[in-house]
Amino acid sequence: MKYLIIFLSLTSITLSAQDITGHVLFDGMPLAYANVYIKGSSKGTTTNEDGNYTLKNITSGNYNIIASYTGFEPQTKNINISNEDVVLNFNLQDSAMLDEVVVTGTLKAVSRLESPVPVEVYTPTFLKKNPTPSIFEALQNVNGVRPQINCSVCNTGDIHINGLEGPYTLVLIDGMPIVSGLSTVYGLSGIPNSLIEQVEIIKGPASSLYGSEAVGGLINIITKLPENAPIAFADTFVSGWGEWNLDAGFKARIGHTADVLTGINYFNYSNPIDNNNDNFTDLTLQDRVSIFQKWNFKRKENRVFSVAGRFFYEDRWGGEMQWNPAYRGGDEIYGESIYTTRYELLGNYQLPVDESMMLQFSYTDHNQNSVYGDTPYLATQRIGFTQLTWDKQIKNHDLLFGMAARYNYYDDSTPATSTADEIVIPSLFVQDEIKLNAKNNVLLGARYDYDKRHGNIFTPRIAYRFKPSEHNILRLNAGTGFRVVNLFTEEHAALTGSRDVIIAEELQPEQSINVNLNYLTKLYTKKGHMFTLDASAWYTYFSNLIAPDYDTNPNQIIYDNLNGKAVSKGISLNIDTMLSNGIKIMAGATLQDVSQTEDGVKQQQMLTESFTATWGVTYKNYKYNTSIDYTGNLYGPMRLPLISDTDPRLPESPVWSIQNIQFTFYGLNNFEIYGGIKNLLNWTPNKGNPFIIARAHDPFDKDVIFDNDGNAVVTPDNPYGLTFDPGYVYGPNQGRRLFLGLRYNLK
């Protein structure tokens, strides 16, 4: 009897279970291998090649059925199951990757497809594919962009775009130029990834809108509006080397008119490691904290008013393994110790007038107290910026008028800055985007800056956009860029304290002329595959290039304008692919030629690769709530900074690659668990080299004999005639390591 009851019960359940069938389409085409599942359960399936699916044996009740496919907006439908099978069809909508809103190219919020200036966009999803403690490191997987480490001891660096050095890249936060010169690596550290809405990158001059330093390109980090951020969030990970990173924050409503978003980043690495056995730390030790807060105020007629601020403090050091703060500034044990304190303030205020007028402002105060061995380097940099824009539309003209003023103050303890460098640079700019017809747009722009050191600076630009169809666009951009003189440097050669500063001539501002051709398209296949192609070719010509000369006379720093030209040219291709089996591939490659020609002699620029490639492969299994990310980059050979003709280190880097893999589980409510391996190939630049740091055993050159001209003499103890040199570095010294992390988001 008992077994009969069980049998009848099971039969009753089976008889009351129904099937859900249907198809998943996009624009009338079937989506093969789309995911269809019941929310809150483990029951799910995928569509076949015809886009059809079946969910079997669904008992009576109310359910939310979700259809999802990579690159498309998920769709949810609520149904009631009773005594009949159900037919449920889905028609997914494109997630509009090409319709992302961008602001960097024109200072206006426009669709990426509608922008006459090509802008690359990277979201927090991209940053999560390879978790890093700072945006500086995260950019290593962006095609044509390379974080360059300039010192193998202190690990400070800058950002190269299309092979151009860091001073040619302008970094913005929410459109405000608060990161520049001295502070690039610090300004890109400490912003929690959870607070970033997107990162926009322009490759090529943008001086007609942004002024000095936007010569090679710019990076704009756009933070979230408080109303778009999670109620609370946290993201923490640890690595096998002992690194620990924490991002945490929350949003709150203050009264009836203000929303506030707060984020905290803390990073700590306190585990000295010397795997290459040179008695120097392979990775700089760091203790860093950053606090970010953004306020949004509600105003009449939805006018904008937001204010954000950030405090940043870091204590970092690298050097001999025996070093501790007691040796700071002495000549017994070598160490490079940097204390950095930084304040930032930025805001947007829409004027209470009928016209669309916006007042923007930013201020940053950067103080650095550092010593390199026994040489102190004390520096202060302040940048103030304010800008008023007027956006006006007249028939088929979209006009933008602006006036700006930038205050620069810089002072340090090196001989390169005998007196503080202080200047105010006023500017006027205008642009007109003309809609010729539905397929053709032209943008004309110009900027005027006045620098009392150089006089009048004029930077025009023109952009043409041809859009033959909904998902095809051709852009041609031409313009000029400029960079004003800044006689300061973080080069270690300038920190000897014994060099005389020689200005060989009246320095002129660096200028550039750039032409960029860009083609972007989106393709679909009948099997549900989707491809986005973004190809560019560029040519940039530089005149009046300024570079400090440390080689002509070891007792001098000689500044002059290049007697010749500098050229950057190349082609790049980005491919974004979404396959019907749930695999997403982002890949890019760049071929470039960056050179300087002086007195008829052409030479490749130092630390500039001839080719580079990046990739990211993601596979999501919706049924098991898991994903796998495989990311990496590949760099071609680059010329390296040797210090003598007898230097035995490689004059050119080999082809090298950093690759990573990550596994993520997101099946827990509000939580994600992730982990993986960084630098799978265990690559470090010491491979194939006798050493990386020259004379690491004698960092104060106590046993080096110099001739009357200040050159090192070859001796049995110094067979190559070298001096201590930590500047031979082109990649990270950190080898393979595991990492494990946890994310929490309360929406």
Image: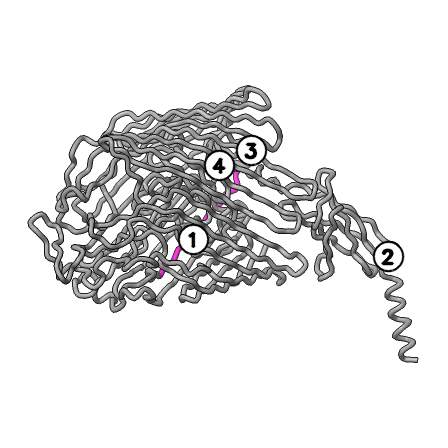
Instruction: Say which of 425 and 361 sits in front.
Output: 425
Residue 352 visible, this orientation? no
The magenta stretch spans which residues? 287-299
Q: Nearer the viewer, mark 4 or mark 1?
A: 1
The three-letter code of the residue at mark 2 reads: Ser
Which residue does the image show at 45% across and 50% down from the upper left?
Answer: 633
Q: Are marks 2 and 1 in contact (CB under 8 Å)?
A: no
Q: Amino acid at mark 1?
A: Ser
Disc number lying in front (2 or 1)? 1
Q: Is residue 292 magenta?
A: yes
**Which residue type carries mark 3?**
Leu
Q: Which residue is mark 3?
A: 113
Q: What residue did someone put label 2 on?
A: 82
Give the residue at mark 1.
657
Residue pictured at 22% horizontal, 33% vertical: 561
Q: Nearer the viewer, mark 3 or mark 2?
A: 3
**Which residue is denoted by mark 4 in the rendering?**
119
Other residues around mark 2 within 10 Å, as few (<14) / some (14–19) / many (≥20): some
> Counting residues from the N terminus, which is met first, the one under dot 4 or under dot 2?
2
Which callout, 4 or 1, points at the residue further toward the start of the chain?
Answer: 4
Label 2 vs 1, first from the N-terminus = 2
Classify 40 as above or below 161. Answer: below
